[in-house]
Image (tube, rainbow, N blue to C red):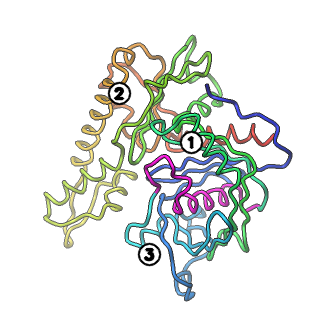
Amino acid sequence: MIATGNEPVGAKLIPVGIDLGYGYVKAVGPGGEVVFPALTTRLMRSSGLASILTGDGETPNGRLRDGFRVTMAGPSARGRYAVGSLARLEGGGGTGVPLDQDRWRHEGARVLLAVAAALASGGTSASLAVATGDPPGHFNQKSRAAAEELLRGFQADVEFEDGPFPGVVSVRIAAARVFPQAAGGIFHALSIPGNVLGEGATEAGVVDIGYGTTDYMILDLRTRNIAEGMSGSLEVGTHRIAALVAEAYHAATGGELPLELAEGVVASGNTQAWWRGRSVDLSKALAEACQEVATTVYEGLRTKWRDRLDILQPILVMGGGGTLLGNLLTERLGRPVTVLPMSQMANAKGFAVVATQLAR
């Protein structure tokens, strides 16, 4: 059963919702909405050269950058790191979020958590109430209790070398709730004005199309119980779309399109690439890749949910691939699905709702 997380834990906690995905970290709090690649790499001592041309953590259009160099101290994370897009620049690929159920013990996950919390809190050094998620395939009551205990003891001092905040931001998590990853979207849906779930709905199917996996679950809307046997993860996501686009580029040119550029094609929809001064149109490759991944997701859901797939109402679709594949899933299902607004941020927004309750 999904708890509401409204137990009193003390006053003046800052609420932060964090979706630590395999491709991107998303967070929502008083500091706004934060998105950056889920990558970290360790750095040596700074020479001062790295940030000589950068500003205060914002891009020229005023938006927060998606890459940072940080120095951390404290029992939960210690060292100097490049985080987000700068981890790819500094380390080639960087270290992402581990795929196992013990991810909160991994250095990379702790660094990403600390940076996301510092950014979403608005750089305020105060105790936090954090709500987040674990993949449904690794989620159970034992793992939930262990994760919440680890998070409640989380302490790290974060210093951003080139903004957006001066000085040290002390991240201290005083209260924590962990849910199945896709459950954040349910909380977000319930908070949207109007009734996106529809009148008389009793069971909702939830499909969270992320970077590395697609999480799915069935939720009883009356009792908030999750159907454990019909909740889990499919090993497919937007990473597969990018890989197929890169393969098509290679077939057309004989050259290699770096994965981060292929991911940029998927994220932006800008299908023009270049090879030795020649324009390469990847629009057909992107469309075919989306078709293939949508089919894989549909077939996975049909295998897991069987005939339940035809009677569920509603089916909520979210995640970074939600907007991209929502219409294609509608075609394959032969019935409409509901793509949540700002689908990439849906889990983080829902977790922020829970964190606000937890902070009271």
Upstream in the sequence, badge 1 or badge 3? 3
Mark 3 lies on a secondary structure that is: helix
Instruction: Tell me, yes or no, whether the two marked residues, 1 and 3, touch with CB atoms within 8 Å.
Output: no
Q: Which residue is mark 3?
A: 90
Q: CA distance from mark 3 to mark 2?
A: 38 Å
Between residues 62 and 20, which one lies in front from this camera angle?
20
Q: CA distance from mark 2 to mark 1?
A: 21 Å
Label 3, residues with CA under 10 Å away: few <14, some 14-19, many ≥20:
some
Magenta-colored span:
97-124
Upstream in the sequence, badge 2 or badge 1? 1
Mark 2 lies on a secondary structure that is: helix
- Expressed as whole percent of the image width and height from the top left, the position of residue 212 reads 38, 47
Dividing the picture into quadrants, the one containing residue 55 is bottom right
Q: Main secondary structure of the magenta part?
A: helix
Q: CA distance from mark 1 to mark 3?
A: 29 Å
Upstream in the sequence, badge 3 or badge 2? 3
Dividing the picture into quadrants, the one containing residue 8 is top right
Q: Which residue is mark 2?
A: 301
Q: Is residue 190 magenta?
A: no
Residue occupying image coordinates x 58% and y 37%: 142
Q: Amino acid at mark 3?
A: Glu
Q: Quadrant of the N terminus?
A: top right
Between residues 65 and 137, which one lies in front from this camera angle?
137
- Expressed as whole percent of the image width and height from the top left, the position of residue 131 reads 65, 43
Q: Amino acid at mark 1?
A: Gly
Q: Is residue 118 magenta?
A: yes
Between residues 298 and 133, which one lies in front from this camera angle?
133
Q: Amino acid at mark 2?
A: Leu
